[in-house]
Image (tube, helix red, strand yellow):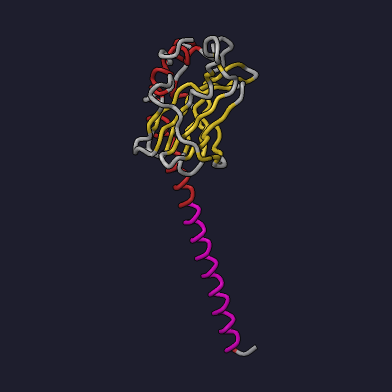
């Protein structure tokens, strides 16, 4: 092989090495950016969690009264789940004459209201109200659409809720597992249809499923 060809091969080989090193460096920087983005997102989620809990003090106090070792800072992120947007045309039927009207949660920017109680509490034609075994969180949007944000069967319940930001709604409640009943928090990214579910290490077998509802909904005669 002549010197010219040998020189060309050396240049090509050197180019491959440089390209490989650049590619590795780029991938390393890319991975670092992804890790940093995930870290920032996790920090944001924890900040939203703390802000939401601060606005749910009656619910926190209720759990503390039932379980003295209950500490809000023990909540940790359990799952992050995307959900299918389920909505249909329906105007808000809860007017000023409804017992649920005082408990509607108005969107911070006036985009609608959230109702977490009207599905749970049923008013029969005769007798007093009773509790539906299932629970639902509904968002009545100001464009005339009704969206279901959360639904749970008899194994759990939604007790309180608050808008943390215009994009995030926090719902507090409980879930019954084999070990007992445990408090739960659902942080709903309304804009992107995402659930962030927070779990707590406390379990109890001495918790009334309707206790918080009856203490908060004072305008409803149970």
The secondary structure that dominates the magenta segment is helix
Report the residue at 60% width, 87% height from top: 5
Report the residue at 60% width, 19% height from top: 133
Along the line of sight, which residue is nearer the eye, 119 or 94?
A: 94
Report the residue at 43% width, 33% height from top: 169
Residue at far front of view: 125
Relative vertical location of residue 122 with respect to residue 28 in this rendering, above or below? above
Numbered range of the magenta stretch? 4-32
Residue 4 locus on image (x, y percent):
57, 89
Along the line of sight, which residue is nearer the eye, 7 or 196?
A: 196
Residue 9 locus on image (x, y percent):
59, 81
Residue 19 locus on image (x, y percent):
53, 70
Along the line of sight, which residue is nearer the eye, 53 or 127?
A: 127
Residue at far left of view: 109
Report the residue at 40% width, 29% height from top: 105
Residue 118 in the figure: left or right of residue 103: right
Q: Is residue 130 magenta?
A: no
Q: Quadrant of the N terminus?
A: bottom right
Residue 142 in the figure: left or right of residue 12: left
Q: Is residue 104 visible?
A: yes
Q: Is residue 15 magenta?
A: yes
Along the line of sight, which residue is nearer the eye, 117 or 150?
A: 117
Q: Quadrant of residue 140?
A: top left
Residue 104 locus on image (x, y percent):
41, 26
Q: Quadrant of residue 92?
A: top left
Q: Is residue 207 visible?
A: no
């Amino acid at each position: 092989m002549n010197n010219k060809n040998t020189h060309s091969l050396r240049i090509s080989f050197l180019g491959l090495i440089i390209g490989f090193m650049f590619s590795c460096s780029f991938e390393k920087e890319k991975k670092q950016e992804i890790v940093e983005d995930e870290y920032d997102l996790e920090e944001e989620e924890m900040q939203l969690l703390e802000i939401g809990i601060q606005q749910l003090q009656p619910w926190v106090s209720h759990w503390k009264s039932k379980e003295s070792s209950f500490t809000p800072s023990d909540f940790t992120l359990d799952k992050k789940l995307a959900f299918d947007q389920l909505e249909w045309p329906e105007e808000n039927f809860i007017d000023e004459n409804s017992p649920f009207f005082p408990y509607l949660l108005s969107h911070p920017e006036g985009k609608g209201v959230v109702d977490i109680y009207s599905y749970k509490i049923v008013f029969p034609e005769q007798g007093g109200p009773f509790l539906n075994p299932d629970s639902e969180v509904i968002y009545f949007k100001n464009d005339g659409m009704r969206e279901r944000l959360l639904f749970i069967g008899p194994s759990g319940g939604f007790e309180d809720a608050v808008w943390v930001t215009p994009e995030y709604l926090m719902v507090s409640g409980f879930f019954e597992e084999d070990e007992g009943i445990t408090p739960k928090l659902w942080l709903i990214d309304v804009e992107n249809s995402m659930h962030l579910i927070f779990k707590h290490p406390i379990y109890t077998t001495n918790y009334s499923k309707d206790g918080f509802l009856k203490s908060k909904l004072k305008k409803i005669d149970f």
